[in-house]
Image (spheres, rainbow, N blue to C red):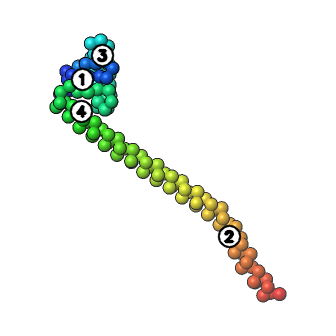
Amino acid sequence: MEILNQEVVHRRFGAGKILSEKDNTITVYFAEYGARSFIYPDAFDIYLKAKDDAFAAYTAERLTETKKREAERAAALTEYVRALDEDKQSEKRLARADKKKPAIRAASVKSAAKPVQAAEN
């Protein structure tokens, strides 16, 4: 859907018209306030309302898609951080186990040596 020249209403600036779209930014011209830039489609969640019903449905769909992608990214990031945390915990457990190994080995060598010494006596 073509979004240029669509009429919108801003809660503070009033009625305006979309002048341009680039990447995820739109520029809206307001008669009393001039041109203002907004993140598209995020601005339609809070600041802007489309005057045309078809355009309103279109922006709502874009906004839903954007929120879904953001939720998927957040979930992936959460999973990545959890995996990193598990790796760190595993490394800590291995480091503690490595520190204990010499003491365990020394204790087992001493206990193995004692019966041999006792047998010699």
Mark 2 and mark 1: Cα distance apart in space: 74 Å
Q: Which residue is mark 2?
A: 104
Q: Is residue 5 above or below residue 93?
A: above
Q: Residue 9's spot in the image, x, y percent?
A: 26, 22
Residue 8: which quarter of the image?
A: top left
Q: Secondary structure at mark 4?
A: helix
Mark 2 and mark 3: Cα distance apart in space: 74 Å
The amino acid type of the residue labelled 2 equals Ile
Q: Which mark is residue 35?
A: 3
Residue at point 54%, 56% (across, down):
89
For this orientation, the residue located farthest to the right is: 121
Q: Residue 102's spot in the image, x, y percent?
A: 68, 66
In the rendered view of the protein, which quadrant contains the C terminus? Answer: bottom right
Mark 3 and mark 4: Cα distance apart in space: 20 Å
Q: Earlier in the sequence, mark 1 or mark 3?
A: 1
Residue at point 50%, 55% (across, down):
86
Q: Earlier in the sequence, mark 2 or mark 1?
A: 1
Residue at point 28%, 18% (across, down):
14
- The residue closer to the viewer here, 94 or 73, is 73
- Labelled pair 2, 1 in contact (Cβ < 8 Å): no
The amino acid type of the residue labelled 1 equals Val
Q: Earlier in the sequence, mark 2 or mark 4?
A: 4
**Viewer can see residue 47:** yes
Q: Nearer the viewer, mark 2 or mark 4?
A: 4
For this orientation, the residue located farthest to the top is: 32
- Labelled pair 1, 3 in contact (Cβ < 8 Å): no
Q: Is residue 79 above or below residue 118?
A: above
- The residue closer to the viewer here, 37 or 99, is 37
Residue 56: which quarter of the image?
A: top left
Q: Which residue is mark 4?
A: 59
